[in-house]
């Protein structure tokens, strides 16, 4: 049995230790906000926080997170950080199909937590592990700039 903290609650799985965290989240725990894009850790659609670090869940064997603290997009939905990002992505037109957005929001939150006043270069670097094929990055960069301005002071991780 593998036990870990997920979005603030202790969960257990009896999945094989080599099963991917992504599959456990989606198929066993019904957390479908985390998406599978490439399955190779290149697109960022499956981004989650593991012990407050942005990670690609498609690359993480469930056995390696025993005792870890995992947070998915569902886990940040009620936070002030998410509310600011959601509003700013909407204002800037940074969402079209929405497939990449959960991972992009996670990357945005990770960036702003680490650097609450990023330059454009910092933003582009911070989201470089996340691919978007619909919107284009200019609107996403603008959304993150706007979130940095509107959410000044809220980016510390709790």
Image (cartoon, rainbow, N blue to C red):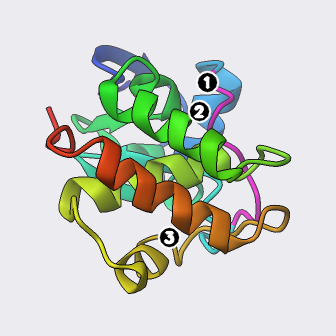
For image coordinates 44% across by 27% down, the residue present is 83
Count of residue discs: 3
In this figure, which residue is indicated by the disc labeled 3?
127
Q: Provide the major secondary structure of the magenta segment.
A: loop
Gap in angstroms between the C-alphas marked 2 and 1: 9 Å
Give the SS element for disc 2.
Answer: helix
Q: Residue furthest bottom?
A: 121
Q: Residues within 10 Å of mark 2 (few under 14, many from 20)?
A: some
Residue range highlighted in magenta: 31-39
Q: Which residue is mark 2?
A: 24
| 35 to 128, vertically: above or below | above
Can you tell which of label 2 and label 1 is closer to the viewer? 1
Estimate the x, y position of residue 102 in percent, counting from the top left.
60, 43
- Residue 143 inside the magenta-drawn segment: no
Mark 3 surroundings: few (<14), some (14-19) or many (≥20) residues within 10 A: many
Q: Give 23 or 156, whichever is nearer the viewer.
A: 156
The reply to whether discs 3 and 1 touch (Cβ–Cβ < 8 Å) is no
Mark 3 or 1, which is nearer the eye?
Answer: 3
> Is residue 64 visible in this depiction of the protein?
no
Tell me which numbered mark, 3 or 2, is placed earlier along the sequence.
2
Residue that label 1 marks: 31
Ranked by sequence position, the earlier of labels 2 and 1 is: 2
- Tag of residue 43: none
Image x and y of residue 101, in percent: 65, 47
């Amino acid at each position: 049995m593998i036990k870990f903290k997920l979005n603030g609650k202790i969960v257990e799985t009896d999945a094989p230790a080599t099963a991917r965290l992504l599959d456990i989240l989606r198929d066993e725990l019904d957390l479908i906000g985390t998406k599978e894009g490439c399955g190779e850790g290149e697109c960022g659609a499956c981004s989650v926080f593991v012990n407050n670090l942005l990670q690609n869940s498609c690359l993480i064997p469930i056995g390696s997170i025993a005792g870890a603290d995992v947070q998915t997009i569902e886990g940040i939905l009620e936070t002030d950080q998410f509310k600011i990002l959601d509003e700013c992505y909407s204002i800037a037109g940074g969402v079209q199909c929405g497939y990449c957005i959960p991972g992009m929001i996670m990357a945005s939150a990770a960036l702003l937590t680490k650097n609450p006043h990023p330059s454009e270069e910092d933003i582009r670097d911070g989201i470089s592990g996340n691919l978007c094929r619909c919107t284009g990055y200019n609107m996403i960069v603008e959304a993150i700039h706007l979130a940095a301005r509107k959410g000044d002071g809220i980016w510390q991780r709790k």
